[in-house]
Amino acid sequence: MTRLIVQLSPLITAPVIARELGPSGRGLYAACFAAMMLAPVVLGMGLPLAVRRRASIGAPESTIRAVYVVLPFLVPSAVAIGLLIERYVITELDTSGTRAFILGMGCSVGFIATLCFQSVLIASRRYGAIALLQSTQPVALTSGVALGWILGSLTLPWILVCAAVSTLISTLVGVYLTRISPRGRRSRLRPLAQESVAYSGSQAAETASNTLPQIVAVVAIGAHDAGLFAIAITVASLPMTLGHTIASVMFRDAAASAVEVGRRISALSIRITVLTAAVPVVVLGCTTPVLIPLVFGDGFQGSVSITLICLCGSVFLTLNYVASQMLVARGSGVLMTAAQLLGLGVSVALMFIVGPYLGGAGAALASVAGWLVTTLASLRALRLSAASLLFRASDFRQCFTVVAKGNIDHSAV
């Protein structure tokens, strides 16, 4: 419960950001932040997932030391990507906004290190440390936004700089939690790179499915409607916290088990994800029409209908993350990539087709359609029978065991 509360800390300042920046500014911020999350995953070339698998079957120290060597060389590439995005996609940034965005893109490479550290912690089942690491960046960003609001300096450049600094703080916390010295035996870079490339498409596709639509929305429907859409995505993504918890608990068992047992664990993870995610989705659906205009202001009244559409696919969005992690655990990175890219392709294509006519609602419909396609493709890739996905009485107990206690009742698998 503590992890859930801390990870949702950005919601404290989300209304402040929305009110200070307005719909257009909120749309630009969503696009910039999405780019800062997507770029490091693409540049990381599947490295965090390779680290996770290695750490699940052996000592991670030599692998992390190799990561230390690689990261500095990725910073110039991240900056170059930022310059291209600013010039051809997010073209409405002013000079100070551009500088802050480019700074954020350079610092975003630290997110690769954070994901690698998180992989080590997941493999060793240090759930308290995982919660702390996952919470550091959002809490630091929230603190920076709150400070800017108190000082009367809450502008888009300020928030982007806070995002950059919060990423670096998260990286330092990861170094502290894993405590792996740069000195010592280091894994050979070439085998690590080859293993990482096998997962590069899968991780990039997964992240792109959650971030690229917010970047594309600025072009397809304009900054104003993109701001309304960004609020909807923020609300619809809230159940994802439960998905992260479930995947963290189930990953190692799925990766270390025989094929048949791993398939049963995958089916169990799907069932309990649906059960746990459905509860907050229903609550959010009932409260959204009142809370959005109350919390974010009358300027975001248009986001209500868009949010309700996105909530219709929120369970699919959460389910996609868990299913993707199960595919990675079973070494099916290629199938995961295919499922994510298929859904992403549907989302982007529909956004340009219906977005110009329906605005934010069109973007929401496009996203939900993409999430559904990814879900269907992921379930097929996992090769789960229809019978294995039927709910059982023991699933409710498993939900509590996995989410609250951080382990699996193997007797019921």
Image (cartoon, helix red, strand yellow):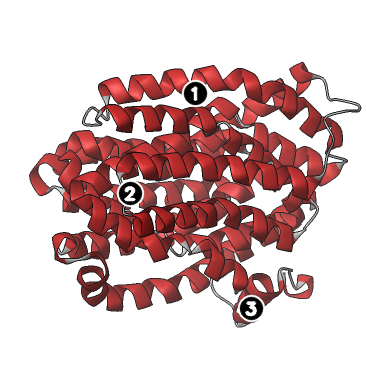
Residue visible at 30% across and 48% down in the picture: 367
- Name the residue type under label 1: Ala
**Label 1 packing within 10 angstroms: few (<14), some (14-19), many (20+):** many
Q: CA distance from mark 2 to mark 1?
A: 27 Å
Q: Secondary structure at mark 2?
A: loop
Task: Give the image quarter of residue 14.
Answer: bottom left
Quadrant placement of the C terminus? bottom right
Query: Can you give x and y, in whole percent of width and height, for residue 344 in the image?
Result: 37, 39
Query: Can you give x and y, in whole percent of width and height, for residue 150 in the image?
Result: 37, 59
Q: CA distance from mark 3 to mark 2?
A: 43 Å
Is 241 on the left or on the right of 360, as rendered?
right
Do tag 3 and tag 2 residues touch (Cβ < 8 Å)? no
Is residue 135 visible in the rendered image? The answer is: yes
Q: Which residue is mark 2?
A: 153
Q: CA distance from mark 1 to mark 3?
A: 41 Å
Quadrant placement of the N terminus? bottom right
**Label 3 packing within 10 angstroms: few (<14), some (14-19), many (20+):** some
The numbered mark, 1 or 3, whose residue comes first in the sequence reads 1
- Name the residue type under label 2: Ser
Residue 195 vs residue 260, the one in the foreground = 195
Residue visible at 44% across and 76% down in the picture: 279
In front: label 3 or label 2: 2
Q: Secondary structure at mark 3?
A: helix
Is 164 on the left or on the right of 181, as rendered?
left
Query: Can you give x and y, in whole percent of width and height, for residue 376 in the image?
Result: 43, 51
Q: Which residue is mark 3?
A: 400
Residue 156 vs residue 211, the one in the foreground = 156
Q: Which mark is residue 78?
A: 1
Query: Can you give x and y, in whole percent of width and height, for residue 213 in the image?
Result: 32, 41
